[in-house]
Amino acid sequence: MKWWFGNGGRRKSFPFSVTVWVGRGRRSLRSDAALESIAKASEDRVPNIVLYNYPSFSGAFSALFAHLFHTRHNLPFLILPFSAVPSLAFRVEDLCTSGLETCYLLDFIPPKEFLFDLSRKSKCKIIGFDHRKSILRHIPPANVCPENIMINVNLEKSSSRAVYEYFTGKHVDVNISDDEAPCLVDSKDKGRMELILKYIEDGDLRRWSLPDIRMFNIGLSEWRSRFSCISNPYMYKQLLELSAEDLIAKGYSYCSARQNAASKLLEKVFRVRLGRGFYGECLGVRADKNSNLSDEIGKLLSVKSAASGLRPIGAVIFMQRDNLKMCLRTTDTATDTSEIAKAYGGGGSPSSSSFMIRMDEYNQWIRGNSS
């Protein structure tokens, strides 16, 4: 394994960057527009290609820092989202462009075969960043790793933070005028951006220690669909305008709206004889048009069921395609819903489980027990 933390950079006399855009309906990252941009980069002998993990929080913000660095220093570059899904992924042949000197892999390390093939065919320097422990077993040992492959894996630091510090260091090392502040991110955005990086890192490293980290991730989740610079040419500007406070508030608003929608369905609850009564009784509700709220509905039902003297379980039933599905939720740590689900061919965890149930069997569970 090669750990590389060197800094450096050089100026170009002219800027060159590529932004590609396709219609919203296009899902493939290896689109005609993307391939045309790669061909244009090859024609213009663009020396820097940046690939970032899509759709990943760390990947998108890492792409932002690469974009800021190359733009500030007039370095020709092309940034593209990269997916490991075969139908979406670029091929090694796509990336072997004329004049390519450096290929950055942000928030992912591809399989060894892809890495070695790209190294051999492109002859460029490959610099990769990742923070996942699972990637360590896929990294080739130092004695077989080509000299032009440099890998940075830090289990104590998210990829986005590592990339931010890397390009900040390169930015400082490049000769800049005396009146220009040595900051990759403008001073007015720096504190806000670094706080977002702390929250992303808290989630990436599974620490979950920062205040409202869950709400932050919920608020940021809606951005996943906008993390492709192919379909969203305004991605970098939008990322720079985000704040942790706004994302947390968005998370609370989202959860509150779902809770309110779920509460409205509790007006039509009925008793459910779990396993025809073998597993006791609880409250249930049909949610055929609101199956996406099954978790919120089930937890509210669990509390209401316990208050009614029944088992602290909420049963949410809805049609899934041509089958009837029952989701069980509980807020009681001493209750295991999965024992019921497993008995009927389903599964899950003690607090959340589900299974398919025949209509005739389901009718036996609710017969004579409506309330």
Image: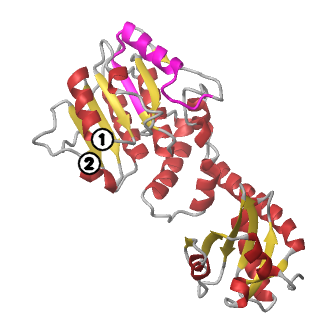
Residue furthest out toward the left: 143
Instruction: From the top left corner, tell me how far across and down residue 120 is, in percent.
Output: 20, 25
Disc 2 crowd rating (10 Å Cα; few below 14, some 14-19, many 20+) is few
Instruction: From the top left corner, tell me how far across and down residue 24 is, in percent.
Output: 65, 29
Residue type at mark 2 is His
Q: Residue at x 70, y 52 (%)?
A: 250
On the rendered image, what quadrant is the N terminus found in?
top left
* Earlier sequence position, callout 2 versus callout 1: 1
Q: Looking at this view, is 102 or 311 the one in front?
A: 311
The residue stretch that appears in magenta: 26-51
**Is 45 drawn above or below residue 276 in the view shown?**
above
Q: Residue at x 61, y 45 (%)?
A: 243
User: Are the residues tagged 2 and 1 within 8 Å (C-beta)?
Assistant: yes
Residue 164 image-quadrant placement: top left
Relative horizontal placement of residue 205, taking residue 232 as reference (left or right): left
On the rendered image, what quadrant is the C terminus found in?
bottom right
Residue type at mark 1 is Pro
**Is 343 drawn above or below residue 186 in the view shown?**
below
- The residue that mark 1 highlights is 111
The Cα atoms of the two marked residues, 2 and 1, are separated by 7 Å
The secondary element bearing badge 1 is classed as loop
Residue 96 image-quadrant placement: top left
- The residue that mark 2 highlights is 138
Q: Is residue 33 magenta?
A: yes
